[in-house]
Amino acid sequence: MSAYQIEVAIPDRDYTIEIAPGLLATARTIDVLQSLANKSRICIVTHPVLMKPYVSPLVEGLKERGIDPFLHVIPSGEHRKTLATVARMYDAFIEAKLDRKSLVVVVGGGVLGDAAGFAAASYLRGIRFVQIPTTLLAHVDSSVGGKTGVDLPQGKNLIGAFHQPSSVLIDPKTLQTLPMRELRAGLAEVIKYGIIYDNAFFARVDALLPRILRRDMEALSEIIARSCEIKAEVVCQDETEQGLRAILNFGHTIGHALEAITNYRRYKHGEAVAIGMVVESRIGERVGQTPAETTQALIDTLQRAKLPVAYPSDISVERVLEVAQRDKKTVGGLLRFVLPLRIGEVNVRSDVPISAIEAATQISI
Ligand SMILES: NC(=O)c1ccc[n+]([C@@H]2O[C@H](COP(=O)([O-])OP(=O)(O)OC[C@H]3O[C@@H](n4cnc5c(N)ncnc54)[C@H](O)[C@@H]3O)[C@@H](O)[C@H]2O)c1
């Protein structure tokens, strides 16, 4: 089975992403956690559904080395990505007697990684944490790059911090228990990397789709590794999103607004991003920069991945614009959009006329 190692070379905070099917069950994982904890306390934060398959073996492995981790197990759901959840994490950290040298280990998807990463970023002004992501979205996106945070009722990820993990350990076998809808949602971000950065990867993902959807470990490992590599390249050039990193937001200006308007309950994050990418590609057509074939290729691949592509008829453009204005993707009050130039290349524009956004949401597919 293929194994991959990707270095995230951010000065002074560099770390390695390790990807291998079965990685969680190996001594390597315990070695990494043991050496990072360096005799200090470990707190594992996770969800109930992940306890038996993934966390219990990890706890056993640590206990065999004389390490007794503290467990904080919390229910799932984007609607729980809140400051209240983070406050409960602080209580758990205090109960676990975590100090400045302690280690938080997050075993879960992007919601938990973002929230627990933010708790680690702010507890005692910042302690180290390790990401053990368990969803495809977290494997390819949220576990890498150090964006942590929580939602407010007014919008997504409005509170947060840049805090890089000390290590990212990815075991694609965790995807064997992931519901199919979640797997597909993660694929939206994989397809995004092809559009924004690498046209050969876009074609490769499209060709691998049947194997990916069958959860073939070789195919999954390959796309996870290339996605992490692209994210790492972008993040290393622009950690705090002063410029280039914004390209990772393709599909997210519209996508985040759709999630907030529907109270984070109608769409999985990746599903909202899939619709957002199609709308934003259509906006690119309207402003004269995206070839219609690019949008069509995107739609075809998303549909083959069985992701939604149609803008919801019950949500007005005015409402989307209002919510998007509050999002972090505005600069000086201007909405910023990432728009394709072709497959593999995008630019960021803040001069999109409202008429182009309106027209892009009114095309039926
Ligand atoms: N920090 C970043 O750079 C970044 C990037 C992209 C997305 N995000 C954030 O990620 C979040 C979405 O993350 P997500 O899609 O992973 O959702 P999620 O964390 O809610 O996980 C989805 C569901 O799958 C369950 N689950 C997780 N792993 C499982 C497994 N192996 N087997 C069975 N069930 C499993 C969870 O309990 C949950 O119910 C959003 O809040 C988004 O804003 C962050």
Image (spheres, helix red, strand yellow):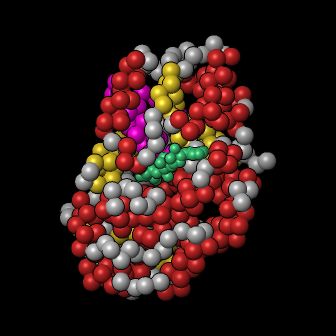
Location of residue 89 with respect to 353 vertically, above or below = above
Where residue 353 appears, x then y in whole percent? 26, 80
Location of residue 67 with respect to 285 vertically, above or below = above
Determine if the magenta segment contains residue 144: no
Location of residue 96 with respect to 116 vertically, above or below = above
Magenta-tinted stretch: 109-131
Q: Which residue is drawn at 48% across and 64% down?
A: 271
Q: Locate residue 99 relative to residue 328 in the image: left or right.
A: right
Q: Residue at x 50, y 71 (%)?
A: 308
Residue 80 falls in image quadrant: top left
- Residue closest to the eye, 233 or 301: 301
Determine if the magenta segment contains residue 128: yes
Q: Locate residue 141 relative to residue 239 in the image: left or right.
A: right
Q: Locate residue 254 relative to residue 346 in the image: left or right.
A: left
Residue 136 seen from this side: yes
Where residue 145 appears, x then y in whole percent? 47, 47
Where residue 332 appears, x then y in whole percent? 20, 62
Q: Residue at x 68, y 48 (%)?
A: 176
* Residue lying furthest left: 333
Where residue 18 appears, x then y in whole percent? 64, 41
* Residue lying furthest right: 1
Location of residue 27 with respect to 191 vertically, above or below = above
- Residue closest to the eye, 164 or 210: 210
Q: Locate residue 137 relative to residue 252 in the image: left or right.
A: right
Instruction: Count how many numbered circles sit on residues in the image.
Output: 0
Residue 289 seen from this side: no
Q: Residue at x 44, y 71 (%)?
A: 275
- Residue closest to the eye, 214 or 144: 214
What predominant SS class does the magenta segment belong to?
helix
